[in-house]
Image: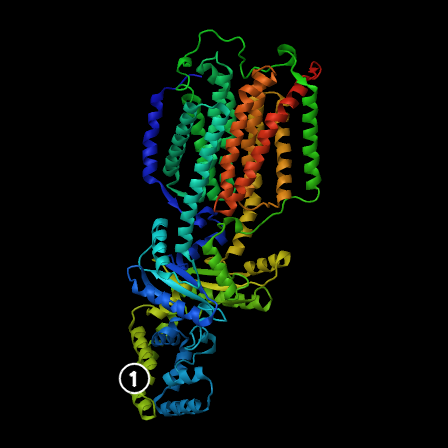
Amino acid sequence: MKHPGRWLWLFLLVPIAFGLARLRFDVEVFNLLPGDLPVVQGLKLYQEHFANARELIITVRASELEQAENTARTIAERLRERTNLVVSATWEPPWLEHPGQAGELLAYLWFNQPPPVLQQLTNRLAASKLAEVLSATHEQLTTTLAPDEIGRLQYDPYGLTRLPDEVAGAAPSLGQGQEAFSSPDGKFRIIYVKAARDLPTYRECAEWLKEIHGITASPGVSVGYTGRPAFVAEVAGGMQHDIQISVGGTALIIAVLFWIAHRRIKPMLWLLTLLALILGSTLALGGLIFGAINVVSMGFAAILLGLAVDYAVVHYQEALAHPDLSIPEIRGAIAPSIFWAAVTTISAFLVLNFGGLPGLGQLGSLVGLGVALAALIMIFEFLPPLFPDRRRPNGVKNKSSVSPDQPSTPHSRGSPKVGVVKVRMVVVTSTVLVLGAVFVLVRGFPAVDPTANALRPRNSPAYAAMDEIKKQLNQNREPFWVIVAGDTESEVGKKLDQLQAVLGRAESNDLVAGFTLPAALWPRPEYQASNRVAALQLVSERDLFKTVALTNGFNERALGLLEQMLDTWDRAAKAPGVFWPSNELVQWIFEKVTARSTNQFFAMGLINPLTVTGPEGERRLAALQADLPRGGVWLSGWELLGSAIFSRVKSNMWFVLSPMLGLVLISLLLAFRRALEVLLSLAVLVLSALCLLMIMRLFGWSWNLLNLMALPLILGTGVDYSIFMQLALRRHNGDLPLAYQSVGRALLLCGGTACAGFGSLAFSTNAGMGSLGRICAVGIGFNMIISIFLLPIWWALFQGKGGRRLTRER
């Protein structure tokens, strides 16, 4: 095979330069998921519009109620002083900390009611009835024993806080509402912190969070952090950890294994140099193709290192085994094996794009691109600097060399000699593996985990803090999110009304345990337009309200809420369009359930699912989903995410495995052109699959939505070893010792590095990538061991049938 000319490599410099300029890293886990699934679309909308990108949630857990309350207050006060870092720190409900701001919300809720409801209020507050209303308030103050009621009436003599029953829940009580800030016993507190600036990148999140840690450290209590800044910083730290452990560890293992096998420093350093070049070039080309590379997809680096080294090691071992051959002759002999091995490996990774997970598809594309680059570089550039005296052909073809495509037969090449003891050992080992796997698997196959746990990081403090919040606030099961979108406020309002009716029926039919919708908070343009006259009428009577209250025993302080509400009604009635309240208290409430973009409006509600699981739970959920309004309504949640994606991955498995199986068969047929050798390679794959399932069952590993993609990877990557081994046996006329010397030792090193590359992912901070790495490492390891130690004997036995001569080993 002729060298294409080193000047051709210069053409790669231009796309590599453009790729490095475009390259950026994406830390959003939702970008790993299929965007056409409604549950994923709902999660992305939630992340974009309702999970405040600048909000950090701090948890405080203490042994005593007062200690927890004092610590939460102290932390909030410290943070508020750092205005360069924090714009707000809320440790108790805003309507308790700033009760004076509640008037705007109350006025808005009245202004947002159907006109007859607001008209009832204006009728009740008619000039002739004001004295009667205040008299009733005095009577309640003298008869009630409820502290909350006394506090309310002292600041609301006209009963403006008595909203209609259907909207009363939307306005917080002035004495209650700790549910989102404290556990029932008060020993667990929550602080909501908003950053003073946007935190678009993971570096900014990590730096900001580091400063927050320094401010909030409190001895004697347990402090946790969750929310987007914490998650993003954690993912970034996990990425750095994964790259250091997986890439650095894999490179170290490659160096150690190469040194153990060859004890030569120059080829080892040259190999590591080329691997670094391949890795950097692949990353740059990935930036050119994708622009953004997800941090989970960065797992490609360790996998690529483990696979790319194969092509160099096979070349090097062949050169050592045949010192009389020139580099072009070695290249001509070994290149077909590398070509077919690279084709199957590249195909195995590229088919991940059909698995339904864009994140894994990106990883597969990067590995496939890197393997193609590695095959070219190692074929043409690895040997020349190591054997400068063997760059040119000798001019006389070595008689012992055999064309890799020319099949050898026992009659034309001599019968392979196989020791009887070795044959018996291989037969016994093969039988034990088959029977052992069958014995384990008849008791059951590995379990299946259909949840979204594979997408979560392992040992995550941010997730631990979130789970602690759910536990302390008695959220036994995470609620579903229902998100409504529309082009106008009126459109969203109509959908909320439809949804209210649907969920009401669902609750009556025991499909859900309960629900909360922001229907009362959502602005109703048609109601507001009709209520402007009534609102202005109330505003015009401001002086009358004040005079009557003062003459009936109430002071100026009792009129503060009334003044706020009248000011709000005045602004609302004069507003040119739809009125949205805007003070700090209202914003804190509204940003949890409403959102506005340049051309769309969004509202979010919560659905509390029943604790029923299994088929019955799935039936009830399906009935709920079927009844939801179509168009602009998304039902989502982490619990729904796992089952939806797992169903997608399962349904796509045949689209992944079928072409992979076909490609493997075609590659084997083209590589061998003999049915026997194709069947032997398939036997290796089947036996290694049985062994993998046995190991998974014994160690309690389960299939999940990420590690299911290990199947095409093991299939496409593992078959390489049987291709290399059988073509080596052909080249050496069935001489097992020579095949071991030239290729067997190289495959041991190759398999070890491939297992190291995949195995390093087992230490990934992402649970799914860790399970994917474990399963691939075990599956490929079995493929390698069976191909090196069992396959040659199988090959010799079947090739030598009828003419084989067994020799007894001494």
On screen, residue 2 versus residue 573, left or right, reads right
Observer-nearest of 123 and 215: 215
Where residue 801 appears, as percent x and y from the top left, is 70, 17
Where residue 382 appears, as percent x and y from the top left, is 42, 22
Location of the N terminus (image quadrant): top left
On screen, residue 139 versus residue 198, left or right, reads right
Q: Is residue 653 visible?
A: yes
- Element at label 1: helix
Please, which colouring scheme is shown? rainbow
**Residue, x 36% and y 90% (percent of image)?**
130
Furthest residue in direction top, as rendered: 396
Residue picked out by circle 1: 542
Q: Is residue 656 visible?
A: no
The amino acid marked with disc number 1 is: Arg
Observer-nearest of 532 and 72: 72
Name above or below for residue 380 compared with residue 529: above
Location of the C terminus (image quadrant): top right
Furthest residue in direction front, as rendered: 220
**Residue, x 63% and y 59% (percent of image)?**
616
Q: Quadrant of residue 618?
A: bottom right
Name above or below for residue 51 compared with residue 584: above
Where residue 164 appears, as percent x and y from the top left, is 45, 78
Name above or below for residue 20 compared with residue 323: below
Q: Quadrant of residue 117?
A: bottom left
Where residue 236 appears, as percent x and y from the top left, is 40, 48
Report crowding for label 1: few under 14, some 14 to 19, many 20 or more residues within 10 A (C-alpha). some
**Residue, x 33% and y 40% (percent of image)?**
22
